[in-house]
Image: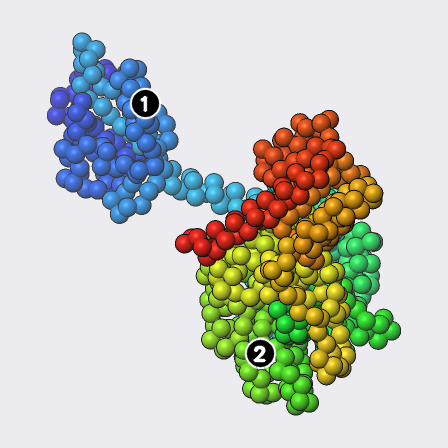
Amino acid sequence: MMDFCRSVWTPEEVLRLDAVILASISDAVIITDLGPKILAVNPAFTEITGYDEAEVLGEKPSILKSGRHDQLFYQAMWATLQETGHWQGEIWNRRKNGEIYPELLTLNAIRNEQGNPTHYVGVASDLSQLKLTEERLQRLVHYDPLTGLPNRLLMEARLQHTLERASREEKRAAVLVIDLDQFKIINDSFGHAVGDDLLVAVTHRLQTMLRGEDTLSRLGGDQFVLVLDALHDYQESEILARRIQAALEAPFILADGDKAYVRASVGISVYPQDGATAPALLVGADSAVHRAKELGGNQFCYYTSALNVQARTTLILEDALRQALEQEEFLLYYQPKVDLRSGRIAGAEALLRWQRPGCGMVPPLEFIPAAEKNGLIEGIGAWVIQEACRQMYAWRDAGLAEIKVAVNVSARQFRCGGLEEVIGKALARYGVAPSHLMLELTESMLMDKPEEAVARMTALKRLGLRLSLDDFGTGYSSLAYLSRFPIDQMKIDRSFVIDIVTDPGAATIATSVIALAHRMRLEVVAEGVEDEAQVGYLWQNGCDQIQGYFFSKPLPAEEFSELLRQGKKFPALEASHQSRTLLLVDDDIPVLTALQRVLADEGYEVLAAESAYEGLDLLAKNQVQVILSDQRMPGMSGTEFLSRVKVLYPDTVRIILTGYAEMDVVVQAINEGAIYKFFSKPWDIQPLRTQIREAFQYYEGVIKQRRESPLRP
């Protein structure tokens, strides 16, 4: 029909008709040659893209490229068009003003009578409004229209994702149902419009306390659900519940200036103990919030009764801690730090104790974690600093020695902005020299945010304080940061000290810390020293100070004062460089006695041990140059013993007595450097004497060479 009509029209009429059709089409039309260069566009093209016809004539369609599609996309599009003469699909283009928009584009090739392409025609429909409408519909499907929070559908999807992550990473998660108490009264009194405004204000206040990974949603009415992701401890949910309740205590100002007060009941269920699925956790949290309301509201409840008991215990503990701070139930004990060169008390570490009414003395591990979580640690820490300064003033006023006191600083206290002010006021009030107060900081505290830690420590150093790195070796300090920390002292953790005499691993760490600290011109203090052998080993390896039960347990101020009055000390450990000390180790008493008798006239100081462990104990207490050990001993063989000694006392010269049956083991020990010489049983007296003399000469030669070495530190 159309072809028949066109056949009776003149060419001019056909052109006018085509122009009218193009002008009336609401879709953009673009005609190009095979270049492709633009030959014509319709008015809709100008309206959609913002380009006038004159601006695009002779240009390529690529003038509209958005940058969202790569070259492969366009290559595939033109290949299809050239092969089939047709292409259709969604594409992102760019308007003249830079706005990127979606469109449905149809491309067709125009062919001549011979079937060869001569032009391309593109027809594009702007999908912007359609996409916007789809997004609005999606938002209505997934978000609460009043508060803009995720609704139940989206919340359940995110909760499922949270549980999958918690399972994969072996972490905890929690669901909190937050139900506003007596919200119906506000709706009835002020109207639903005011109630809606209040719900929006509550939403904004709740959002200020969330992490980026948490999901707050509204289920409808006055009930919210909070999904907590990646928790390390279930009590993190409890802490947040309290913060939410505290945040809602401040009044909300209504549009007419009136005040409205909102309280909330919170129900908590925890993954995995309360359920492994989203429905189970939601049901559990809902049940818990109903229990909270039954108990009077404005409180939280766990779904699991055991967690509720723990929560109640924590609440009671926190209330008791607040009372303890107000009524001065805390006190400080002081553990002496002893100088290993003089044996005298060089200072003390102040250790917090709590004299809780009806409970006796409470150790820090039972209340410090709770104080850290609820923020009370800042007030307690300030009291510790104040009391330590007061006690230093009291000792000085009583005519006792000027004692330097170290106090432990918590991570929260260290990061808070008021620490310098607290310390400055305490020092000024009691006239204490800043250098007499030392702050003990832990590795984990400093390495949490090392750059900030350096800045905070530098500010504290400006006050003249001394800083100690506590528990060194148990954390993850990098040497790069360690060199930047402005510290004065390093402490060896008790976990390395306890086995320092018998465990080469612990000994290596301890001696490495001592060497590193001295290279950095820092003092070294070993904690948890409990026996003479530990003292001896630490002294032999250059440790500066010790603290632990070997000298004194932590004492109340008055008992510590008595130590100062008495001038208590242990005898200074003195090196006996002139004596040649030989250690004999053999579980066969007659053989041990015979060896002592044979070597009695050689001028050695001879120590005898009936087991390898007794030998290690004697080595820690005495400076020994040469060791002669039997191979076959119960508990620990001679080669095992001397292998440990090689690490613990690398300068010693080590000789073993053995039978031919153990030669393979002995040869291996020689190859590993654990043994200097070996003697086969039965041994001859004279060669044995000669070899022991040569062993001492060898030891003295090695030591002399080391002292004369230009590389000696």
Residue 369: horizontal and vertical position, in percent? 70, 63
Residue at 58 percent across and 76 percent down: it is 437
Amino acid type, mark 2: His
Residue at 43 percent across and 40 percent down: it is 131
Secondary element at tag 2: helix
The residue closer to the viewer here, 268 or 621, is 621
Q: Please say whether residue 409 is visible from this viewpoint.
A: no
Residue at 55 percent across and 51 percent down: it is 700
Residue 364: horizontal and vertical position, in percent? 73, 66
Q: Please say whether residue 357 is visible from this viewpoint.
A: yes
Q: Which mark is residue 76?
A: 1
Amino acid type, mark 1: Ala
Which residue extends farthest top? Answer: 114
**Quadrant of the rendered image containing residue 310:** bottom right
Residue identified by numbered label 2: 436
- Real-space Cα distance between discs 1 and 2? 78 Å
Q: How crowded is mark 1: few (under 14 residues within 10 Å), some or many (20 or more)?
A: few
The residue closer to the viewer here, 454 or 592, is 592
